[in-house]
Image (tube, coloured by chain):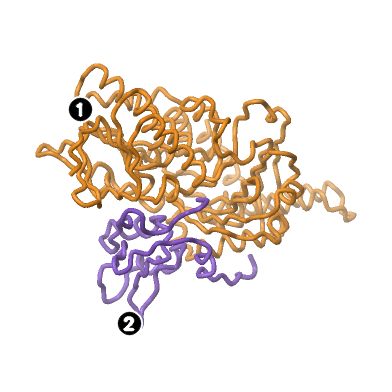
Chain colours: A purple, B orange
Amino acid sequence: MTTEPTVRVEDKLFFNRYLVDSGRPHIKVRPHTSPSMNLLSLLKACPAKCYELNDKGQVDVTPDGCLECGTCRIIGEASGEIEWSYPRGGYGVLFKFG
Amino acid sequence: MIHERFDAIVVGAGMAGNAAALTLAKRGLKVIQLERGEYSGSKNVQGAILYADMLEKLIPDFREDAPLERHLVEQRFWMMDDRSHTGLHYRSDDFNEERPNRYTIIRAQFDKWFSSKVREAGAVVLCETTVTELAQDAYGRVIGVKTDRYGGEIHADVVVLAEGVNGLLGSRAGLRTTPPADKVALAVKEMHFLPRETIEARFNLSGDEGTVIEAVGTISRGMTGMGFIYANKECVSLGIGCLVSDFQKSGETPYGLLEAFKRHPSVAPLIAGAEVKEYSAHLIPEGGYKAIPQLYGEGWVVVGDAAALNNAIHREGSNLAMTSGRIAAEAIFQIKSRRDPMTAENLALYKKMLDDSFVIKDLKKYKDMPQLLHIQSQNFFLTYPQLVSKAMQNFVRVDGTPKVEKERTTLRSFVKARSWTGLFGDAFRLARAWR
């Protein structure tokens, strides 16, 4: 494609229903000083854009809008960089259509 | 701790889990099914196409009350470049039959219905319960599960792992490894709502007829991937998926691809003016036959996506899930009937029965396809679609160029892009992998 359309993921996530388990994120990033290639790839590969760089250049996760697809688990679990669990029963994204 | 003891625990209420729980309960076994969602279906994502034959084996009269969308009378394959598509359409009135073969469905609604059948058959279905790990005895035999409910350990003779593509229980217990990034695809999807008549007019349908469009080409930007457009009654499911490893390498975003696919001149008019009501994402096992893990062990079996049972070439997953769930349940019932213990030795019956079914036979047939398409993604998903598009345009555009010259230009463009060796090699490799 010649022009990259501007996409705001936030607008897409706004369609969905969530029950956020406040204070109990189901995904954690292992503390690091500089991020690996795998962690950096999550900034773009996560379909809910849950991963962002903080002001120290480290990768942070905010899984409130998580679609529970498991892409970051595939990319970062084996190396221990990502700790991935399912949300507690009943919490997380609630698909109406799926 | 739930002190009641069960014959079987089924983890997960997707296609595989529901098929297993239903079959076990119908056979009179005492079953408990655990689902982390608010209801069965609320965490499940698929395109989605339902294959009637596999569901008929479980619920023969499902057409009476299942929430079906449209029965498919047409299949369209599109090979796309940035501004065009070359299509192969198959449409037949034969599909307007009394018992149609394929339907579009909306998974959250369908699974809720499926789950009601599981309950009617006598299984206990416990929702909003996440299973956190397998309970094992001192010898490593699986004796039940631990859940996130207070004191939530449950024991049973056998655990059916229908935990989906992110099978945490299996990987945490070392029963199988997490699939690598080049063996799983990430698909994103949106639900576009339009009036019924608009959908029927735009897709050339009447009544409950339905159609499916599956598209490959520059929409995946050289990655191994595919776009899809499914017509439901009052909405259109539209999505695109590519290998996770390709997303990593390319730095493309899934939502960027989805947005570009929606804006493609062949796609945009189909969804113009629609109201989007949901955005979802899901992983699809793409490793094929060679990626199937150990399917049974001491006190456990694994079914569906958790067992990577997915036919990427025919885009069949849910029917393999349903069938593996049903077969696992039948094997368990046979063992139980003989009053034998649920040992690995006895549960090997599940694998034997699955090997004899279409599930493993089909996956075996295409065992070399994933590797071919994954390694050659640039050729199959970018170069060829562009060449085909140019060739088609050259063929149909009338501009005074002599036809002989036009044909020569087309042939030259193929040879230039792939060389004779490349062209013959690709044809040979494709034929061999398809065989």
Residue placed under numbered mark 2 in the picture: A56
Residue A77, placed above or below residue B97: below
Q: Chain of mark 1?
A: B
Tell me which amino acid carries mark 1.
Answer: Thr
The secondary structure type at the circle numbered 1 is loop
> Where residue B146 sits: x, y (%)?
21, 46
Which residue bears the numbered disc 1? Answer: B343
Q: Is residue B78 left or right of residue B365?
A: right
Reply above or below: B251 against B313: below
Which secondary structure lies at badge 2?
loop
Q: Residue B244 placed where, x, y %? A: 43, 56
Residue name at image x 20 percent, y 33 percent: B5
| Residue B121 percent across, percent down from the top left | 39, 29
Residue at the location (35% across, 69% down)?
A: A61
Say if residue B364 shows up in the picture: yes
The answer to which of B418 and A6 lies nearer the viewer is A6
Q: Mark 2 or mark 1: which is in front?
A: 1
Q: Is residue B33 left or right of residue B406?
A: left
Q: Are marks 2 and 1 on the same chain?
A: no
Distance in Å between CA atoms under marks 2 and 1: 53 Å
Q: Residue at x 55, y 45 (%)?
A: B106
Badge 2: chain ID: A
Q: Viewed as shown, does residue B91 lie left or right of A7? A: right
Mark 2 Cα shell of 10 Å, populated few (<14), some (14-19), many (≥20): few
Residue placed furthest toward the bottom: A55
